[in-house]
Image (spheres, rainbow, N blue to C red):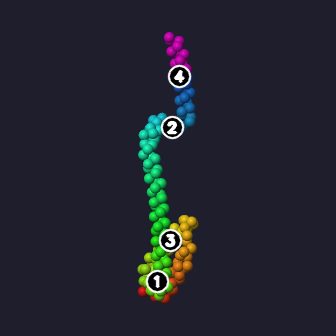
Amino acid sequence: MFEWVSTYLGDFLIYLVIGSGLIEVVPIKLNPWSWLAKRLGRAANGEVLSKVEAVSVALDKHVESDEKRQAKENREKILRFCDETLEGRRHSQEHFNEVLEDITEYKRYCEGHPEFPNDKAVLAIERVEQIYRKCLEENDFL
């Protein structure tokens, strides 16, 4: 029995010495508990994670739809403002500032979404900007 213990204990000590040398030479952090906890967590929460992913996709679609709706509203404001100038209606500088902000947001959206039809407001934007420059130079706001 003593021979068996000494033989296997000797082999164990050799492996222990070699293993501890490798651990000191190669600083690899092995934590089986965190690995196991991650696997168990994913297994237990798999359904919740898939639902969160589905909600995230739905939210992304909603945000995209809302941004597109806002761009259309901005375009509508720009076109209405341009029509008012064509009818001879004058505007205050504050009103111009509001529509210029709408123009900035609209252009930003169009730059980020090349598939969005932008050609509907290009000339109206140019007209509003020209009239604004003229009113600014002549101080001729309402």
| Helix, strand or loop for the magenta stretch, by majority | helix
Q: Position of residue 99 (x, y in %)?
A: 46, 77
Image marks 2 and 1: residues in contact by CB distance under 8 Å: no
Q: CA distance from mark 2 to mark 1?
A: 70 Å
Please tell me the numbered disc located at residue 13: 4
Residue 29: which numbered mark, if any?
2
Disc 2 marks a residue whose amino acid type is: Lys
Disc sitting over residue 84 in the figure = 1
Dot in front, 4 or 3: 3
Which amino acid type is marked by label 1?
Glu
Q: Which residues are magenta?
A: 1-11
Q: Amino acid at mark 4?
A: Leu
Give the Cα separation between the discs numbered 4 and 1: 92 Å
Q: How far apart in space, not on screen, are marks 2 and 4 (Cα)? A: 22 Å
In the image, residue 84 lies at what x, y percent?
Answer: 46, 83
Residue 141 on image: x %, y %: 44, 86
Residue drawn at point x = 46 percent, y = 61 percent: 63
Relative to residue 64, is residue 80 depicted above or below? Answer: below
Q: Quadrant of residue 40?
A: top left
What residue is shown at x 54% (from left), y 16% (from top)? 7
Q: Which residue is mark 3?
A: 106
